[in-house]
Amino acid sequence: MRKVKIERKTRETRIICEINIDGKGRYRIKTPIGFFSHMLELFSKHSLMDMKLDVKGDIHVDQHHTVEDAGIVIGTAVLKALGNRKGINRAGYFIMPMDESLAVVAIDISGRPFLKFDADLAGKTSDFETCLVEEFFRAVANTLKANIHIRLLYGRNDHHKIEAIFKAFAKAMKTAASKDKRLAKELPSTKGLLD
């Protein structure tokens, strides 16, 4: 089974994460930011990755360290759980509607980190600073060593916009991380490596 548990401690955050890529979308998420916890629950549910995540952060400063470090840990955990990456689809994309909002996410677990983030977000929804959505996905892209493109085509409500992004990311990740039996002993690359 492709699962891992990792822990990251800094002066700003303490994060423990368990991920099972071949799960059923079961989750136990605890962060000090309610809306962010909800988005990570959506990620787990729609990617079918089981995830236990316990995040403590210096939100008395602001939310940045907490959100960015959670992205670092989740990206690192998924990469470690993928192991040698033989047999994975490697790439995936999804177009996700959420009421009046529509988001497109494409991912390539290529070994070459890059994030293209194109979404107009207002500033705050509930208790969450919306500028941190991009920082979260940049941290995931860098530590997962993935090429991630996120585009919000349209929307009105920031909650719906961000939810569409997280769900589209989850569905794209599910495809990219899934195994194809025809490629069981091969890396999905003509170069023979993913770097």
Image (cartoon, rainbow, N blue to C red):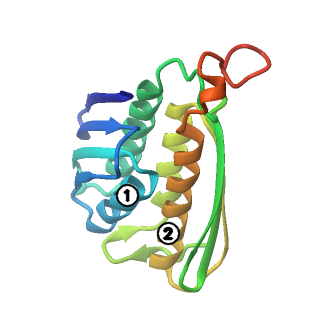
Q: Residue at x 58, y 86 (%)?
A: 100
Residue 192 figure quarter: top right
Type of the residue with mark 2: Ile
- Label number found at residue 162: 2
Q: Report if residue 104 is visible in the image.
A: yes
For the C terminus, the image quarter is top right
Would you name the residue on which mark 1 appears?
45
**Residue depth check, mark 2 versus mark 1: number of the one nearer the observer:** 1
156 or 123, nearer to the observer: 156
What's the residue at 25%, 40% (across, down)? 13
Crowding at dot 1, Cα within 10 Å, few <14 / some 14-19 / many 20+, comes out as many
157 horizontally vs 26: left or right: right
Relative height, residue 37 to residue 1 (above, below): below
The residues bearing labels 2 and 1 have C-alpha atoms spaced at a distance of 16 Å
Give the residue drawn at x 59%, y 22%. 184
Secondary element under disc 2, as helix, strand or loop, is: helix
Residue 11: percent from the left, percent from the top? 23, 34
Q: Residue at x 59, y 29 (%)?
A: 181
Q: On the rendered structure, is 66 left or right of 162? A: left
Image quadrant where one finds the N terminus: top left
